Amino acid sequence: MINKILSFLKSLTEKAKPILHKGAEHGAHHAKVAAVGLAGLYWNLTPQNRYRVRLAAFAFAILSLGIVVGRVTNVNRNVKIEASDKVLKIQKSGVLELSLPGVKLNPEIYVFQTAEKVQVPVNIKVPGRLAFNAEKSKVLSARAPGRVERIYAFDGAQVEIGSPVVELYSPEFLSAQQEYLLSSKTAQVLESSKTMSDLLGDARITQQAAANRMRNLGAGEGDIKSIETSGKTTSNLIMRSPLKGVVVKRNVEPGSAVNAGDVITTLADPKHLWFLGNVFEQDFRMIKQGQKMILTLEAYPEKEFIAYANYIAPTIDPQTRALLIRADVENTDDLLRPDMFASGLLTTGEADAVVVPQTAIVRVREARYAIIKVGPESYRRVPVKGYDLNSKSFAITEGVEQGWQILAQGAVLLNDRFAKQEN
């Protein structure tokens, strides 16, 4: 093949000689010299380099042949570009309408329902947290200086009314016991003498004052009767729980010294909690005491807890610009814990709305949309207003009319077609 190409090039050179001679004999002479020079250079190359030159010439010939064939066979053809069968219309109000001629939606994926307006509660969201009910909580504090001898109930311990919590050594309590015993013995002696009735009355008054002093220091009625019966004083004061609940926080250790007023421990009833929520300024006018509130927590997403607002703060928080609202929560099942975050839905009234599943609502940033069927192959995406009834249902208050066919399932999928056409 290489030899044929060289022969072809040589014949072209021979045919071009007369033309070059007529046009410019001097130029032809130089061309002949150049051709002879090129041939000499080729044969002066080593066999390996001549092989490379032949390969390059062969590749050039194939490339040239491909260009010639491509130009000869090129035909200008009209390519038909079919228009999309999807048509998107944008109305002046911003509503999008999509036509899908010839496209049938799968009824197992795209489910429509007829819009029906019903009475639904009007709710506002109230974020907040749980806390111990302060009205059901107590703080045990030292009534006189002393020393902690023993702790009966540590943090988290269950206590009953009258259960021992802490034992204190107190000189004042010991003095009050001795005064009570002395007045009691004096009264017993005077009772046997009818001529000293006035002194008996004074002794009874002194005895009662000593008993009150013991009560003020933290002694119970059982402790006072025990001292009177036995006739002996006790070295330590046992402080007892005033309620049924748990030890929330302990502030002392065994052997530590306490002064009058020092907090020893905090007790609370876990069956009674508070919900402390924040209501924002735009909702102030709608809240009242006694309104029902439904609480949901992340720990129990499928469970609802009922509470009723019993307190509305008279001032707003200057930092959060929110109003504190409080509600009693009954924790009969022991599922709730203080400081759990909770979200409340406060019912402020009733309104007409179309209730749809959450799958019917398309959320794009802050806006919400629903898709309705306006023809056999036409669909419209309309903006709606409303609120979450719960985790499964949404109440549409504006944007959908009675009797419309609204897409209850598959709205997000069909919205993708709206988005593609819109772009």
Image (spheres, rainbow, N blue to C red):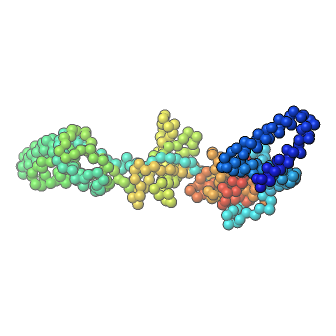
Residue drawn 52% across and 43% down? 279
**For residue 189, side relative to residue 388 (left or right):** left
> Is residue 339 in view from this perspective?
yes
Quadrant containing the N terminus is bottom right
- Give me the residue at 70% from left, 56% from top: 414
The answer to whether residue 299 is left or right of residue 196 is right
Query: What percent of the width, then of the height, locates residue 6?
Result: 79, 49
Give above or below for 102 relative to 384.
below
Q: Residue at x 78, y 47 (%)?
A: 90
**Camera-nearest residue between 100 and 125:** 100
Numbered disc total: 0
What residue is shown at x 67% (from left), y 64% (from top)? 109
Residue found farthest to the bottom? 108
* Residue 151 percent location from the top left of the image: 21, 50
Residue 398 is at least partly visible in this image: no
Quick check: 197 left or right of 398? left
Horizontal and vertical percent for residue 155? 29, 51
x and y, in percent, of residue 379 in the image: 75, 56
Query: As rendered, which of 272 and 386 lies closer to the eye?
Result: 386
Residue farthest to the right, as pictured: 22
